[in-house]
Image (tube, rainbow, N blue to C red):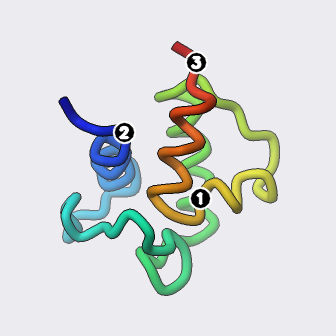
Amino acid sequence: MKTTKETLKEQIIQTLNLEDITVDDIDDDAPLFGEGLGLDSIDALELILLLERGYGIKLSTAAEARPIFKSVNTMAEFIESNAKE
């Protein structure tokens, strides 16, 4: 069975159309924004939608999302403790 992190990486790649990136290319601790994956504010909005649609988690502001979207690890931890079954 896939881990939350593996599933999340696949969803990030698919949601953001990261064609040249594989699950293995994304380090669990690497920053998603800036020097890591190099995502931008539009990508952040897509990730907010991903959490809402995929996990039933609503984030009200970008400021609230910033610490959650720090890395795959922080997103996976947040999903595991907040996802609606």
Amino acid carrying mark 1 in the image: Phe
Left or right for 8, reference 74:
left
State which tag comes first along the sequence, 2 or 1: 2
Q: Residue 28 at what x, y percent from top left? A: 38, 63
**Picture quarter containing residue 67?**
bottom right
> Pointer 3: residues within 10 angstroms few (<14), some, or many (20+)?
few
> Pointer 2: residues within 10 angstroms few (<14), some, or many (20+)?
some
Residue at the outermost bottom position:
35
Which callout, 2 or 1, points to the residue nearer the camera? 2
Circle 3/circle 2 CB separation < 8 Å: no
Question: Disc 2 on helix, strand or loop?
Answer: helix
State the separation of the CA atoms marked 2 and 1: 15 Å
Amino acid carrying mark 2 in the image: Thr
The residue positioned 23% from the left and 68% from the top of the image is 21
Left or right for 81, reference 29:
right
Q: Quadrant of the N terminus?
A: top left
The residue indicated by pointer 1 is 69
Circle 1/circle 3 CB separation < 8 Å: no
The residue positioned 41% from the left and 74% from the top of the image is 37
Q: Residue 36 at what x, y percent from top left? A: 44, 79
State which tag comes first along the sequence, 3 or 2: 2
From what the image shows, is residue 6 above or below residue 44?
Answer: above
State which tag comes first along the sequence, 1 or 3: 1
| The disc label shown at residue 84, or none | 3
Q: Residue 53 at what x, y percent from top left? A: 52, 28
The residue indicated by pointer 2 is 4
**Picture quarter containing residue 84?**
top right
Left or right for 55, reference 5:
right
